[in-house]
Image (spheres, rainbow, N blue to C red):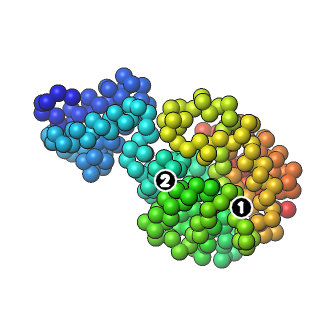
Amino acid sequence: MKQERWTVLKVLKWTTEYFREKEIENPRLEAEVLLAHLLGVDRVGLYLTHDKPIKEEELKAYREMIQRRTAWEPTAYILGYKEFWSLRFKVSPECLIPRPETEHLVEEALRIGGQLKPPLRMLEIGTGCGAVAIVLAKELKDTQIVATDISPHALALAQENARAQGVEEKIKFIHGDLFPSGEAPFCLIVSNPPYIPTEEILQLAPEVRDYEPLTALEGGEDGMRFFREIARGAADFLIEGGWLLLEMGKGQAPQVANTIEREGFTHIELVPDYAGVKRVVKAKRG
């Protein structure tokens, strides 16, 4: 950008074209989101002030954001937050960025939770930034949630998000892998485990492969490692008739369903996302 009068609209047009040249998906949206964050307005606010000149210090900060994005750093890490379930969650490279498809996991958990008799006690395995546990805590009354994660840094972030959303007292965060020892049985176990096969990691988009934590992505040689481990251990942590809900990747539904069935679970149902991909499996302890 040259030293000249740069208005909001002019900056947006320049950035959109630059992002398009760099093959950034949704270039206009990306430009809007970054500039709106920098100026402290929403995207509509950008067009209400489209003729407003941008100060030199703002241009400098925006250039830095553009450089980070064209180096394939995820927008969520640049902003420091991600929207999920219409809530804002702080994120960092220590945790996986919440995905829209995970909202299907939340929907099913809320549907089941709403049919169970309170008080409810739930477990989330691999909480990351805490998005799923926090939404469940906010949406379901008389509910206590235990949330585990192997990363202490992710847990610290999840605790911060829980405080910001006013549900810190409803969630117990525990550092550890998979199931928490010494905890009472749960009526529901929910997880979005790592499920990408090892050989596919290098084929991921650079935003994911180079920036997000691989421990939250890699699911072993066949992508099924954590599904097997969770299925084996879940019954010991569920009440009779308790439910297990898992998010899974495209094409994994038959394997996951068979794995869960072999461990004695019943009432197995595969729930599709809006694209028709079987995204969530839910099953009942027999």
In which quadrant is the N terminus drawn?
top left
Gap between marks 2 and 1, in whole Å? 25 Å
> For numbered disc 2, what is the local secondary structure?
strand
Find residue 263 and report its image quarter: bottom right
Q: Mark 2 or mark 1: which is in front?
A: 1
- Within 10 Å of the Cα at label 2, are there few (<14), some (14-19), or many (20+) other Cα atoms? some
Give the x, y percent position of residue 283: 77, 56
**Where residue 84 is drawn, which disc sits there?**
2
Give the x, y percent position of residue 116: 69, 70
Give the x, y percent position of residue 175: 62, 62
Horizontally, residue 27 falls left or right of residue 143, namely left
Horizontally, residue 15 falls left or right of residue 88, namely left
Mark with earlier residue (2, 1) = 2
> For numbered disc 1, what is the local secondary structure?
loop
Q: Are marks 2 and 1 in contact (CB under 8 Å)?
A: no
In which quadrant is the C terminus drawn?
bottom right
Residue located at (42% from left, 45% from top) = 77
Q: Above or below — where is 148 with respect to 210?
A: below
Q: Amino acid at mark 1?
A: Phe
Q: Amino acid at mark 2?
A: Phe
Is residue 83 shown to the viewer in this render? no
Residue located at (52% from left, 42% from top) = 212
Find residue 200 and report its image quarter: top right
Residue marked by disc 1: 179
Total numbered labels placed on residues in the image? 2
Residue located at (81% from left, 51% from top) = 260
Residue located at (72% from left, 40% from top) = 220
Give the x, y percent position of residue 181: 73, 67
Horizontally, residue 100 falls left or right of residue 10, namely right
- Within 10 Å of the Cα at label 1, are there few (<14), some (14-19), or many (20+) other Cα atoms? many
Is residue 137 shown to the viewer in this render? yes
